[in-house]
Image: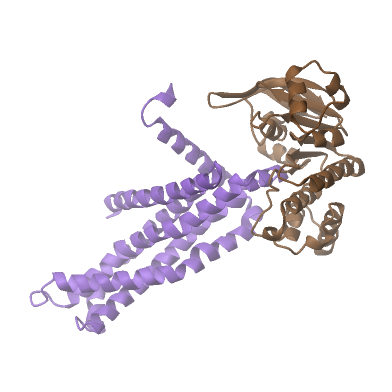
Amino acid sequence: MIEIKNLTKRFGDTLVWEDVSFDIQDGETMAVIGRSGCGKSVLMKHLNALLYPEEGEVLIDGKCVFELSYTELRKVRQRFGILFQGGALFDSISTFENIAFPLRYFTEQGEDEITHNVQEALGMVGLEEAAEKSTAELSGGMRKRVGLARAIILKPDYLLYDEPTSGLDPKTSEEINELIVTMADSLDITSVVITHDMHSVLAISEKVAFLDEQKLSWFGKTNDMKHSDNKNLLEFISASEYQIK
Amino acid sequence: MISNFPGSAGIQQFGHYAKLLYQALRSSTEFSTYRKNLFQEFIKVGYESIPIIFLVGIFTGAVLTLQTAYQLDTDIYPSTIIGSIVAQSIVIELAAVISALVLAGKVGARISTELGTMRVSEQIDALESMGFNSVSFLVVPRIIAGLLMFPILYVTAAVFGILGGITAGAVDGILPAAEFMEGARAFFFESDIIFGFIKSIVFGFVITSIACFKGYNAFGGAEGVGNATTQATVLSCIFVLLSDFALAAILL
């Protein structure tokens, strides 16, 4: 379980958000939504202490990640898989090596086992044929799939998605959404999805956290959004392609 | 407030630079993390720089020989003095400094661009999020390669510099190779080579550490990477010259 308690973040004199608190239960899929620049990705990077806040805590199974030693933190980070916005693939190595990368450094697996696991991960994201391609040959959607394959290769407890459908066509976005649901179901993973794509939110998430006006403006079940009296949330939703029915 | 007085930004930058070096020092024990990258960096910093160092050495030695002959009246001085001046200038100063200024552009710019691109495309975040120590993985092997490869490149530049001087002297009819070498040997001190070695180690550290610092902390997309690379190259050149002066004042 991830508990976010009274988190406040500033960059210099600029307040990103303050006093953000909510919980993410094991096994659930949560969407963090909000306008561009509201600090969704910044919030995500606090979950495994890639960024540190000015105030507040993030507790993973009761331990605050900001108080861990670097050695302890690295172990906690290995419990997370992250799909970054652009994939964040290492462009000096092939697709196969990108996915095999964590296995080579953090496991004792032999070459046969690594090959098997990489192929299995590529199979899960529907890219069995892409193993030997260079990352420069991959399309935007393929890069995200490969990034996802790399994110799940160490079988993490938590999977974080940073704008998984941004820049993709509607059909590919739909496929990525289906993948997120499949991952959550088949791997029994706790997922946090940073997005402003309301189609994604409806398709994949059970709960929603809405960041607005430098604070957590609304938090609740996805199905309850339409009953919300939060004017900004309703405006945000109706401004997207999704219309509340 | 510390952020309000003149020069505070520079002090803050130096603080961040010192912190990165401290992290790199602490991470240098994680040999298994950077072993593979270290050998790649030996190739990139050392082996792949040999062609440009060869050219720098040859032409520096050749031009220095022609200019020394032009400036000295060899009816007054023996012609062997040209070999003495050229060889000693190359060994003490030019092989190390000119090579370092060229390598600030070649090696420093490559390192800052590589790391800067990795930073802005979130590849460094990806490494950290997997549980890697990104400083150990990316910074440590580059600095070690600088410390170990720059002395080798210095020797290469010095050897080719003297060869360039001998060749230019012989081809231009200024002095035969034997006289050049006689002059070079007359004023050869082992301490000069040690001095050159020390300089090249310091320059290797200055160039790779500044490039790593600027690249590792780049931000703001392609423009940010460009700025980081420019700053790394300019700062490296400035600190090469400053440290050259400081070492001369201390060691000579």
Question: Which residue is drawn at the image coordinates 81% and 43% (left, top)?
Answer: A156
Chain A color in figure? brown
Coloring scheme used: by chain
Picture mark count: 0
- Picture coordinates of residue A190, whole percent (x, y): 84, 36
Question: Which residue is drawn at the image coordinates 64% and 45% (left, top)?
Answer: B122
Chain B color in figure? purple
The picture quadrant where one finds residue A30 is top right
Q: Is residue A226 visible?
A: yes
The picture quadrant where one finds residue A185 is top right
Of residue B228 and residue B72, the one placed in the foreground of this image is: B228
* Residue lying at the far left of the rendered structure: B76
Quadrant in which the N terminus of chain A appears: top right
Give the left or right position of residue B216, taking residue A231 as reference.
Answer: left
Give the left or right position of residue A64, taking residue B162 as reference.
Answer: right
- Picture coordinates of residue A136, whole percent (x, y): 67, 59
Question: Which residue is drawn at the image coordinates 49% and 49% (left, top)?
Answer: B226
Asked if residue B180 is positioned above or below residue B145 in the image, the reply reads below
Q: Is residue A62 visible?
A: no
- Picture coordinates of residue A46, whole percent (x, y): 69, 32
Asked if residue B47 is positioned above or below residue B136 in the image, the reply reads below
* Residue lying at the far top of the rendered structure: A229
Question: Which residue is drawn at the image coordinates 78% and 61% (left, top)?
Answer: A130
Quadrant in which the C terminus of chain A appears: top right
Give the left or right position of residue A172, taking residue B126 as reference.
Answer: right
Of residue A121 and residue A208, the one placed in the foreground of this image is: A208
The picture quadrant where one finds residue B106 is bottom left
- Picture coordinates of residue A19, whole percent (x, y): 68, 19
